[in-house]
Image (cartoon, rainbow, N blue to C red):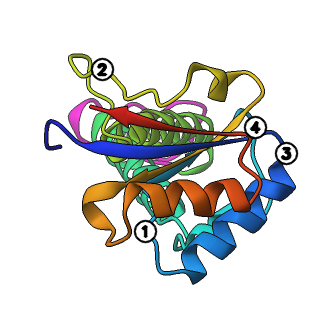
Amino acid sequence: MDSNRNFVVGIFEDEDVLLHAVEHTREKGLKIHEVYSPFPVHGLDEALGYKRSRLPIAAFLFGMTGTSLALLMQIWMLGYDWPMIIGGKNYASLPPFIPVTFEMTVLLAAFGMVGTFFIASDMKPYKWPRQFDIRSTDDKHVMAIDLATNKMSKEEISALLKSQGASEVNEKNF
């Protein structure tokens, strides 16, 4: 991200007011940088124009990788590398492999999703997050609008946010 970015930050008390303000702000042609809320707001993703997440596809692929690796590992170890007849069963019998296969599927899906979440969220151990208002983790909803990506002036955006129900409008520089 660029340094010295200016944002207009609208602070909202109620999630319904925030949702209507997001819809109206986008109708006016403004690009909203991000909306921060202390709890999920139903319909906010659609109002912001976010597309459906592809994370379930990644979870499925990580799970299938775990399934494949577990079966390959067990078939190799018990069927070719060190074959043993246990209880009169075949060398590589599938039913005894099911518990280990399930556990490996869940393990790789979980680890893969944690890594994918950190990458998708741009959460690095050396990067400090931008916090537009400390109260966004407690009881306020915060809408941040980047001045560099919009054609309206700071005063026009501030007036628009105030007219849409923002209890406060501030400027934040990063």
Q: Which mark is residue 131?
A: none
Q: Which residue does the image show at 30% across and 20% down from the upper left? A: 128
Q: Is residue 68 left or right of residue 93?
A: left
Q: Is residue 83 magenta?
A: yes
Q: Which residue does the image show at 74% across and 55% down from the upper left? A: 18
Where does residue 135 sit, x and y in percent of width and height? Answer: 65, 22
Q: CA distance from mark 1 to mark 3?
A: 21 Å
Where does residue 164 sit, x and y in percent of width and height? Answer: 73, 61
Q: Are marks 2 and 1 in contact (CB under 8 Å)?
A: no
- Mark 1 lies on a secondary structure that is loop
Give the residue number, with chain letter if any, for mark 1: 31
Q: Which mark is residue 39?
A: 4
Q: Is residue 2 magenta?
A: no
- Mark 2 lies on a secondary structure that is loop
Judge whether residue 60 can be spotted in this image: no
Where does residue 46 sit, x and y in percent of width and height? Answer: 66, 72
Question: Along the line of sight, which residue is nearer the eye, 95 or 24?
Answer: 24
Question: Along the line of sight, which residue is nearer the eye, 49 or 5?
Answer: 5
Q: Which mark is residue 128?
A: 2
Question: Along the line of sight, which residue is nearer the eye, 131 or 100?
Answer: 131
Q: CA distance from mark 2 to mark 3?
A: 28 Å
Quarter residue 100 falls in = top right
Q: CA distance from mark 2 to mark 1?
A: 24 Å
Where does residue 43 sit, x and y in percent of width and height? Answer: 76, 66
Q: Which residue does the image show at 60% across and 63% down from the upper left? A: 160
Give the residue number, with chain letter if any, for mark 3: 14
